[in-house]
Image (cartoon, helix red, strand yellow):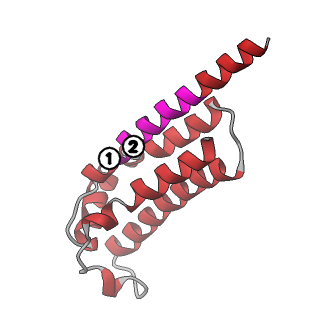
């Protein structure tokens, strides 16, 4: 019985490592398609896909669905795993909210000054850094 428990422990660690690699690839995919040199170009690129089809826009965020999948398949409903899913949902909702306000020509006082600022490569990869680190601590 003890050997079987060791086997399950090793198997779980290997699957977490595999999930971590998969999350890294999914985050790279999201970085690649969400391009733009300024926030306005970034939002315009997002809005292009959002305007075409809302479902397609959601499917272009596979790491959100992957975080749900990992939580269910690894049976981890702890604080950090739930926080990861919550942050991903809030991130997506914030993007949709800002795009909606911007392209309906509504007042965006809180963000209007930052629309023409340049986005550094480090800022583009913040999601990769935060989500992968949070995933690592949530599942190990």
Q: Is residue 50 left or right of residue 94?
A: left
105 or 16: nearer the viewer: 16
Q: Secondary structure at mark 1?
A: helix
In the rendered image, residue 12 lying in the magenta stretch gets the answer no
Q: Are marks 1 and 2 in contact (CB under 8 Å)?
A: yes
Q: Report the predominant secondary structure element of the magenta stretch.
A: helix
Pick out the residue farthest to the right.
Answer: 1
The quadrant of the rendering that contains the C terminus is top right
Where's residue 7, x and y in %? 65, 17
Where's residue 122, x and y in %? 31, 65
44 or 72: nearer the viewer: 72
Q: Secondary structure at mark 2?
A: helix
User: Toward which corner of the image does residue 72 lie, by quadrant?
Assistant: top right
Where's residue 78, x and y in %? 71, 47
In the rendered image, residue 26 lying in the magenta stretch gets the answer yes
Pick out the residue farthest to the left.
Answer: 37
Name the mark on residue 28.
1
- 48 w.r.t. 26: above or below: below
Q: How many marks?
A: 2
Range of magenta residues? 13-28
Q: Is residue 32 left or right of residue 18?
A: left
Question: Gap in Å between the C-alphas at discs 1 and 2?
Answer: 6 Å
The residue that appears at 68% across and 39% down in the rendered structure is: 76
Query: Residue at label 2?
Result: 24
- 138 w.r.t. 10: above or below: below
31 or 102: nearer the viewer: 31
Name the mark on residue 117.
none
114 or 27: nearer the viewer: 27
The quadrant of the rendering that contains the N terminus is top right
User: Toward which corner of the image does residue 103 lie, by quadrant?
Assistant: bottom left
Where's residue 43, x and y in %? 30, 66
């Amino acid at each position: 019985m003890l050997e079987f428990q060791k086997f399950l422990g090793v198997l779980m660690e290997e699957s977490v490592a595999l999930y971590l690699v998969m999350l890294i690839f999914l985050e790279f995919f999201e970085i690649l398609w969400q391009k733009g040199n300024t926030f306005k170009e970034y939002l315009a690129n997002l809005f292009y896909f959002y305007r075409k089809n809302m479902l397609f826009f959601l499917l272009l965020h596979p790491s959100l669905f992957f975080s749900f999948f990992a939580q269910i398949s690894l049976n981890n409903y702890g604080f950090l795993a739930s926080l990861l899913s919550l942050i991903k949902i809030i991130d997506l909702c914030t993007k949709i909210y800002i795009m909606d306000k911007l392209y309906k020509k509504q007042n965006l006082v809180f963000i209007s000054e930052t629309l023409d600022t340049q986005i550094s490569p480090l800022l583009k990869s913040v999601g990769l850094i935060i989500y992968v680190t949070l995933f690592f601590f949530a599942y190990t």
